[in-house]
Amino acid sequence: MESFDRKKFFSGIKKVVIKVGSSVLTDDDGNLLESRFGEIAAQIFKLREKNIEVILVSSGAIASGMKKLGAEEWATDIHTKQAIAACGQCSLIWSYEKAFSKYNIHVAQILLTHNGFSDRKRFLISRKTIQRLLEMEIIPIVNENDTVAIEEIMIGDNDNLAALVTSLTEADLMILLTNIDGIYSEDPKKNADAEFISLVNEVNNEIEKIDGGTTGKTTTGGMKTKIESVKKASLFGVPSVIANGEKNDSISRIFKGEEFGTLVLPSQDKLKARKHWIAYNLKAAGKITLDEGAGAAILKKGKSLLPSGILKVQGSFGIGDCIICLDESGTELARGISTYSAEEVRKIAGKKTSEIEKILGYKYSDEVIHRDDLAVVSKKNEK
Ligand code: GLU
């Protein structure tokens, strides 16, 4: 019995990414298991009743295409695989559509490749679209766009895709449903004495070297990519669960706080992780100079940056780009994500928040950089 209070932990979740592996959706002969789709839809319906937003990441396009086309073997050449995926993706979505229609829930298909995450503009557009779908109470179902995914832009497996989607959507939990109960000390198929690990506090070397399990005719990554994925989520500050999606009520059991699956705790607070990402991972697209009052407000009081404290704007950044905040002597104070473009900031710099709408004709927000999007990098003045 673990001492960790799972029930309390899961009761705070508001947005979850659930990845469903091909092995969960197909039987041993590769047929799509309509009953499994039904079960998933029923459990997600219950989450939705509790106002929990759900984004699905689903594999199964290739598995379903293989069955449909009578392909016995897992295709090895890329174009055949892409053709099979294209053919199977529609059956996959159709199965979800049928299952969710029972609850009057619409689903939407989102196909992404790696540049959907690395290209800032695409990242923001995908994020906005998914956000809009959630507001419209539609379930986004994400898969890799296998048809166009050549090596350079390929994510390669849906475990890693799920971690990227978790960060994209700023979800506060990621669940990977597979055909094994969770992480074992060794591959339980090879060693009957393998120990089940129900709680991982940190994805360290010991955990990372574990391999095996979850392999099958239609699966892609096995435990290796699952561990990569939960490690990523943990670095983003998000907890995750690897659990057996072939068992009844798997999702509901996780949310009830049952000791079901392996729970991986985040390595740091989500906001801290986000700020770290802003400070060290994003390429700055412009600079703004702040007056003393604005500098002190963000450094010492943890405030958002308002237009009134901005003296100068350099560069041609767009909405959502990372910008550097300087003091009047040119010392870097902070980095943050801009709510407005450089052109817009030039117009509202030095002006009061109440004047934004009059000047621009619209207003996205009071702040040029919201405090959650602002990472202080100046050590000397930091509170
Ligand atoms: N995109 C692949 C499919 O839909 C699955 C990749 C994976 O399972 O990791 O078949």
Image (cartoon, grey):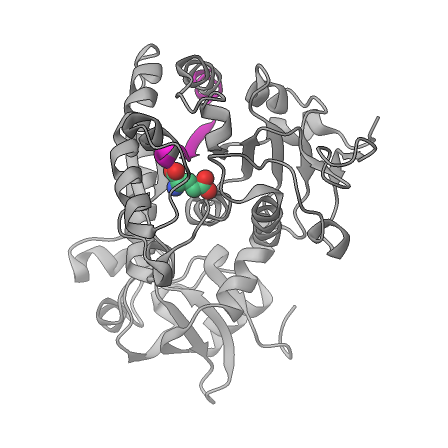
Of residues 166 and 327, the one nearer the viewer is: 166
> Residue 292, position in %: x, y?
48, 78
Image vertical order of residue 361 relative to residue 130, above or below: below
Up/down of 142 relative to 382, above or below: above
When the figure is inspected, residue 264 is found, relative to residue 332, above or below; the finding is above
Say which residue appears at 29% left-offset and 79% top-offset. 315
| Residue 345 spot, x, y in % from top left | 27, 69
Q: Which residues are magenta?
A: 45-62
* Residue located at (31% from left, 28% from top): 70
Quarter residue 63 falls in: top left
Is residue 49 inside the magenta stretch?
yes
Q: Residue furthest left?
A: 361
- Outermost residue on the front side: it is 72
The one nearer the camera, 338 or 207, is: 207
Quarter placement of the N terminus: top right
Horizontally, residue 284 falls left or right of residue 299, namely: left
- In this rendering, does residue 112 appear at all? yes
Q: Is residue 368 visible?
A: no
Is residue 133 depicted above or below 157 in this figure? above
Q: Which residue is rendered at x = 30% and y = 32% of the image?
A: 88
Q: Residue at x 78, y 35 (%)?
A: 191
